[in-house]
Amino acid sequence: MWVNNVSVVLAHGAWADGSSWRKVIDMLRAQHIDAVAAPLPLTSLSEDVAALERTLERIDGPVVLAGHAYAGAVIAGARNERVAALVYVAALAPDEGETVADVFYRAEPHPQAPHLAPDRHGLIWLPHEAFATAFAQYASPPELSVLAAVQRPIAAACIGQALERPLWRDRPSWFLVAGQDRMIHPETQSFMARRMGARIHAHPVDHTPMVSAPGVVTDLIVEAARTISAS
């Protein structure tokens, strides 16, 4: 049976789409938890939040909302009353008045982190080689090929908009700190998680554990879902 009708909505980060959550979706459904991946346009923070809200409108009952990387800022902008808990997966958690860029660049980048700059359309693409060196260094070659092939650029406008009051100030939260992350410094993740008062789980995983370590991610989401169900 379902976990007391708790559903999960998953938000992908930059350079990805909903397929990055495929393994987690399968694992959640094996535990009788329904999951939906929200399609984000990655065109501006406001438009991404609006797209997430449209997905939430289609879900009945309480929701655990999980975000990866950039989508940590997106899920913090949600205002749907059915959101009962937030799960941050190697994610960015700006506070009120902060931007994604403020927290992303808080620490010195990893030596293998890619150089990022917008193109003439204002879009930021991840260099092809960065998928293997920084984005998901523990993923298999076939998985890396798919990640690179389906990547979606993020608009520079997404990372420069200041947040309003983040939802994590009003909902219980969980945070997976990725100890081998080469995109978002693990120390930055730990700082944000502590500031949020999140329930912190740290693992030696890369920046995209939904692909390379889906069991770790699934366990965290299930913990959140069961906690909400029990309460």
Image (cartoon, grey):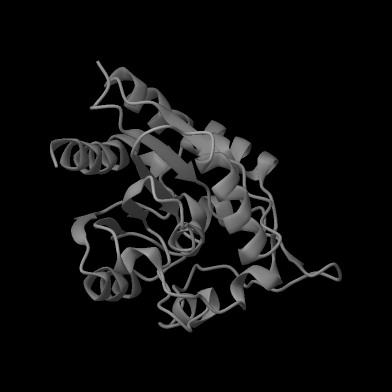
Which residue is farthest left?
230
- Residue at 43% across / 52% down in the picture? 67
Work out which quarter of the rendered image holds the C terminus and state it. Answer: top left
Residue 195: image x %, image y %? 25, 76
Q: Is residue 37 above or below residue 163?
A: above
Q: Is residue 211 left or right of residue 41?
A: left
Q: Relative to the observer, which residue lies in front, 26 or 174?
A: 174
Q: Relative to the observer, which residue lies in front, 189 or 199?
A: 199
Residue 68: image x %, image y %? 45, 53
- Residue at 67% across / 40% down in the picture? 150
Residue 61: image x %, image y %? 36, 34
- Residue at 33% across / 64% down in the picture? 168
- Residue at 65% across / 71% down in the picture? 116
Q: Is residue 17 left or right of residue 70?
A: right
Which residue is farthest right?
120
Is residue 141 among the parts visible in the rendering?
A: no
Is residue 172 among the parts visible in the rendering?
A: yes
Q: In this view, does 120 lie above or below 5?
A: below
Q: In this view, does 171 lie above or below 5?
A: below
Q: Relative to the observer, which residue lies in front, 48 or 116?
A: 48
Q: Is residue 167 above or below residue 192?
A: above
